[in-house]
Image: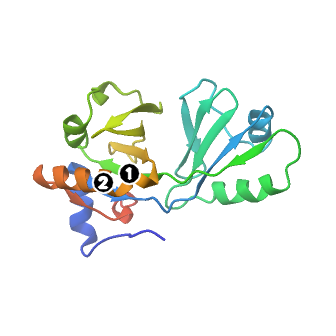
Amino acid sequence: PVALHFGDPGAESEFSRTLGLCDVSAWPKFGVKGKNAARWLIDRYIDVPDDIYDVRTLGNDGIIARIGPNEFLLEDGTTGTAVAALSEQLESAEGRVYRVERQEATFLLSGAKALEPVAQVCGVDLSKLLVRRLIYTRFAGVSVGVISAPVKGLPVYRIWVDSTYAEYLWENLSQISGELGGRIVGVGCLNRE
């Protein structure tokens, strides 16, 4: 379960278009690793990224990222079911395909001003970030993974951080976002038309 909204979905939808911060750490995620990992995914009709750090769509609103020659990160979105289905299939897989538990926290920064808080905590200019490409960098001294993953034309950045640093990074991003006129939003605002 994730928070769909914190009171007024219409107001949150407006904030998500300018500057919204959302915690979606509960979205299902796991990794697949091994010599046959890519073949196993292809056999399940998954659009497997060709190059390391490339990202593709998974199901309705999830992502799959190639994070090594034979390793993939999979994460669903609000309406996705692909990760759960693949997880069940992996339980019965034999051979050189292995499950990797992924316990990172996942945050979303959305809106036209989404990169403004990032500019205060990151030394890399993420405005040059390629869409559907995973970048590893540091935010406020903490290692993170970031992708640009627009939702219905809205700029959205997925940020993964080790769960032991999640509270620290969340506090930093929420404080900076608030100072810039943004606010914490529920994930429901990203599904609104």
| Location of residue 46 in the rendering, given as x and y in whole percent from the top left corner | 69, 41
The residue labelled by disc 1 is: 165
Quadrant for residue 9, please give it: bottom left
Vertical side of 83 occupied by 139: above or below = above
Amino acid type assigned to the residue bearing label 1 in the image = Tyr
Q: Are marks 1 and 2 in contact (CB under 8 Å)?
A: yes
The residue labelled by disc 2 is: 168
Amino acid type assigned to the residue bearing label 2 in the image = Tyr
- Residue at 74 percent of width and 42 percent of height: 45
- Residue at 21 percent of width and 66 percent of height: 11
At numbered mark 1, what does the secondary structure look like: helix, strand or loop?
Answer: helix
Mark 1: give few (<14), some (14-19) or many (20+) Cα within 10 Å. some
Q: Nearer the viewer, residue 138 or 41?
A: 138
- Residue at 64 percent of width and 25 percent of height: 50
| Location of residue 128 in the rendering, given as x and y in whole percent from the top left corner | 32, 24
Give the number of the disc on residue 144.
none
Q: Nearer the viewer, residue 81 or 119?
A: 119
